[in-house]
Structure formats: structure tokens, C-alpha cells
Image (cartoon, rainbow, N blue to C red):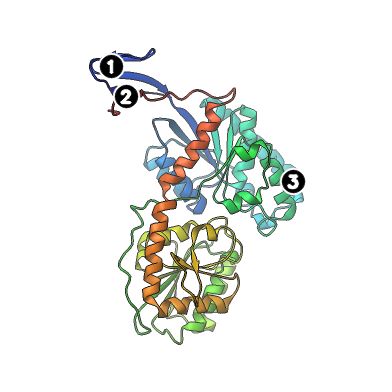
């Protein structure tokens, strides 16, 4: 796509070759880069929310986004409402809904699944060529494999945006090893959502220089802090956990910890926000039964799905994250920090890139929360009670967290990291075009 850029010129400024002068302005024809963003689902979840923020904040003077999704859903609806070109290219449910826990060589090499997947790759490659795409951005593990193969066929650069830990504690070992091998050969460049995630890829050589860490950032306009209320056991205080209902997110640990401190904090409210998404309804039913066994029906609230997460976080006093596996990142923790909330989280994966931890017994300079061992109900309960008892410390943690979010975790900072890699991969090499530079002294863009 071509766009016109207008620059105001002083009356005696010289014109550059290739520019068109009209009065005191110069017009420059610029070829924007068409970036195809591919994702295997349109469900409104962590990776999809981050993709939405990236596409919306992309510099339209340099890039034209084209989003291709393998199904209908909230992501497609929100993009289309903003007039962002979005194409739904349906993919069979057995591929879309396949869970990482069930993956194996036998599953991946299923002849019918391979045939359907191969046909889809060909369709996607034709679409890439038809729209004269300059670069393909793949947003999930499944879209990495499918989009990477299609980009290879179409002979255009491809970026894998890796949002999951490629490790044996997160994926079947053979799948993790295979994915690491493909990561060195299939994409042109790699984006990771954290240093921790990037390390699990075990990259080397030239691919290391074509990889970037882009922490998923938040829009600070949407997440703003409210005054922190001083609390006592007789006050209504809210501890909130936000995340997909799934065993590895640790909602059961949160409930067990709540059961330990509830007798001493009878008015505390423990909120669980989220829904099961990939056949995990049995786990959700088990959580409700767990609450009944402990007699916590009046203190544990299942909020379900909510599209008003900023409001819920602002009304909370303490944010809790109870994952049982190392988190690839943990964007919801950044959202809580942006709302000025102290954080209690399990210590694993990328969380030390986000949280500056103190301890239950010792205050640390600049601390934004407490990190506790994974799967430890007792440590989780102790951390909850420590912050409930010391509301002044909790308030300072929230203030520090907001400052940290402002410095490191904005959506603008994320987009810049991504655009830097796009520039690298679309400017150099035989598939790439030069990006015009602004005149050095031609004044402000009109």
C-alpha cells in the first residue's frame, strides 16, 4: 500500500530528488509494509489480547496490518469494529482445539490431520501471495508451525512470536525438542514474551541476532490506580485471582490458602475471575465442590468471564497469581501493578522479570510484591495474611508496581520492540525494501 506524507518546508529549503514540491509543503510517496498477523484462534485470551494491542498500536505510516484468524470469535469482532482488515480462514476443530498435553508424534503424524493441515498451509500461502504480504507474524505455537510453513512456500520473511515456554515442564519432551529445532530453521526471526521464554528455545548463531524480547505491555490509560484503603479483619477486603480456569493456573491452591486464613478474616472476599476454555469444565466443577467442603460459599466468588478486568482489579486490595508451572510471562500481573495493586505470585518462569520481590519477614527496597514457592498452600496463605495485616506496606508495593509498569511494561514499548525486528527483517535481504527517512530539517509532519 502507498501513502502520502506531507512535510512543511521553510520557503528557501532545497528539495530532495524524488520529492514533489507544492507551495511550502513537500509530498513523499511511501510504500508501507504489509504485515500479515496469523493466529489459530479468535478466542479472547492472553495471547490474543496481546495481539490486539500490537495491531491497534502499529505505526500505520510504516505498516499495513492484515489479520488472518482460523475461526470466528471476539478477537475478530473487535478488530473488524476498528476497520482493521480481518480474514477468517477456517481451520478444522481437531487442530484448533488440540491441547498441548495431548500432543505427541503419533498425534502430529496422523495422516488425516497432516492432509488437512497441508491443505490449509497451501491456502494460507496463496493468500499471502495474493495480498503481496511483506512479512508474516505468527502469534501462537500452532500458528508458528502453520504460518511458518506457509510463509516459506510464499517466500516471504516470517516472525514467530513465542508466548509459551518451550520446555519439558510445559510441553511433551519430543514436541519441545522438535519445536526448538524448527525455531532455528523455519522462521526468519523470533519474538519472545520474556527472557525466560527465549532461553527455553536454546537459540544460537545467526538466529540469536534475529531474536528479540518484547514483554507484553498494557495501556496505562485503561489501568489506573485508586487510593489504597487501610484495612482490618473487620473490613471487607478483596483478594483477586484472574486467569483461565485450568489446573496449572492453581485456582485450587488459592482456595486452600483462603480456607486457612478465612477464620481470621471473616469478611475477606476471594474472587476467581475466568472460565475454562479447552474442555476443562470438570476441573471447574471440582473447584466449586472444594469451596463447599470448606464452607466458603460466602467468601469465595466465581466471577466467570469478564471484559471489565481493569474495574475488577481497581476494586481489589491484593492480586494473587497461583500458577503451578513457570509462567512464560504473566501479563495480568502487569495489569494489576498498573492498577497499583500489591502482587502475590508463585516463583517461576518469567515472574522475576516482572515482580521485585520482598519476603514475608523482610522488606526489600522497591518491592512490588511477594513471590512464594509453587504448590505451597501454607506459603501462599502466609503471604496473603502478611499483606492483609500490613496495609501500609501493601500500599507502597502497589505504588512501586505502578512505577515499574510505567517504566517497563507499556504497550508502546512492546510495539517498538516488535517494529524494530520488523524493520530488521524487511529492510535487509533479497525480499526487503528500503524504508524512506524523513527530511532532516523539514519541520513537523502535517
Whether pointer 2 and pointer 1 mark residues with C-beta atoms closer than 8 Å, the reply is yes
Question: Which mark is first along the chain, 3 or 2?
Answer: 3
Quadrant for the N terminus, please: top left
Residue under numbered circle 2: 441
Cα–Cα span, label 2 and label 1: 9 Å
Q: Residue at x 56, y 79 (%)?
A: 378
Q: Position of residue 397 (x, y in %)?
A: 41, 67
Q: Secondary structure at mark 1?
A: loop
Say which of 48 and 233 sits in front: 233
Question: Which mark is first along the chain, 3 or 1?
Answer: 1
Q: Is residue 122 left or right of residue 371?
A: right
Q: Position of residue 45 (x, y in %)?
A: 49, 54
Residue under numbered circle 3: 110
- Tell us which disc is closer to us: 1 or 3: 1
Q: Residue at x 37, y 70 (%)?
A: 395
Residue 103 visible, this orientation = yes
Residue under numbered circle 1: 13
Amino acid at each position: 500500500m502507498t501513502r502520502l506524507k506531507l512535510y512543511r518546508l521553510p520557503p528557501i529549503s532545497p528539495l530532495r530528488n524524488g520529492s514533489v514540491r507544492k507551495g511550502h509543503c513537500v509530498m513523499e510517496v511511501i510504500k508501507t509494509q504489509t504485515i500479515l498477523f496469523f493466529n489459530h484462534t479468535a478466542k479472547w485470551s492472553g495471547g490474543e489480547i496481546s495481539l490486539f494491542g500490537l495491531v491497534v498500536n502499529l505505526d500505520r505510516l510504516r505498516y499495513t496490518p492484515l489479520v488472518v484468524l482460523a475461526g470466528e470469535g471476539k478477537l475478530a469482532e473487535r478488530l473488524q469494529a476498528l476497520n482493521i482488515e480481518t480474514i477468517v480462514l477456517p481451520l478444522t476443530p481437531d487442530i484448533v482445539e488440540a491441547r498441548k498435553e495431548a500432543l505427541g508424534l503419533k498425534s502430529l503424524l496422523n495422516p488425516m490431520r497432516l492432509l488437512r493441515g497441508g491443505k490449509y498451509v497451501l491456502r494460507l500461502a496463496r493468500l499471502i501471495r495474493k495480498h503481496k504480504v511483506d512479512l508474516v507474524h505468527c502469534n501462537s505455537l500452532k500458528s508458528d508451525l502453520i504460518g511458518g510453513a506457509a510463509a516459506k512456500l510464499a517466500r516471504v520473511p516470517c516472525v514467530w512470536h513465542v508466548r509459551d515456554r518451550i520446555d519439558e515442564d510445559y510441553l511433551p519432551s519430543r514436541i519441545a525438542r522438535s519445536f526448538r529445532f524448527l525455531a532455528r530453521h523455519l522462521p526468519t526471526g523470533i519474538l519472545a514474551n520474556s527472557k525466560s521464554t527465549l532461553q527455553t528455545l536454546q537459540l544460537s548463531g545467526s538466529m540469536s541476532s534475529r531474536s528479540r524480547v518484547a514483554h507484553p505491555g498494557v495501556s496505562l490509560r485503561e489501568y489506573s490506580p485508586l487510593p489504597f484503603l487501610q484495612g482490618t479483619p473487620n473490613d471487607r477486603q478483596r483478594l483477586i485471582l484472574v486467569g483461565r480456569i485450568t489446573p496449572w493456573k492453581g485456582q485450587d491452591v488459592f482456595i486452600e490458602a483462603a480456607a486457612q486464613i478465612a477464620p481470621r478474616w471473616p469478611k475477606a472476599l476471594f474472587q476467581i475471575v475466568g472460565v475454562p476454555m479447552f474442555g476443562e469444565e470438570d476441573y471447574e466443577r471440582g473447584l466449586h465442590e472444594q469451596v463447599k467442603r470448606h464452607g466458603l460459599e460466602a467468601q469465595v466468588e466465581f466471577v466467570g468471564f469478564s471484559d471489565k478486568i481493569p474495574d475488577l482489579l481497581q476494586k481489589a486490595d491484593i492480586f494473587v497469581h497461583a500458577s503451578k508451572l513457570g509462567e512464560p510471562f504473566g501479563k495480568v500481573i502487569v495489569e494489576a501493578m498498573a492498577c497499583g495493586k500489591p502482587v502475590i505470585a508463585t516463583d517461576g518462569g518469567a515472574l522475576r522479570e516482572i515482580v521485585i520481590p520482598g519476603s514475608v519477614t523482610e522488606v526489600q527496597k522497591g518491592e512490588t510484591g511477594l513471590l512464594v514457592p509453587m504448590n505451597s498452600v501454607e506459603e501462599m496463605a502466609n503471604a496473603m495474611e502478611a499483606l492483609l495485616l500490613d496495609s501500609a506496606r501493601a500500599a507502597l508495593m502497589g505504588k512501586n508496581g505502578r512505577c515499574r509498569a510505567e517504566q517497563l511494561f507499556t504497550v508502546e514499548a512492546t510495539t517498538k520492540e516488535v517494529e524494530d525486528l520488523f524493520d530488521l527483517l524487511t529492510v535487509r535481504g533479497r525480499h526487503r525494501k528500503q524504508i524512506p527517512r524523513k527530511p532532516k530539517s523539514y519541520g513537523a509532519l502535517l
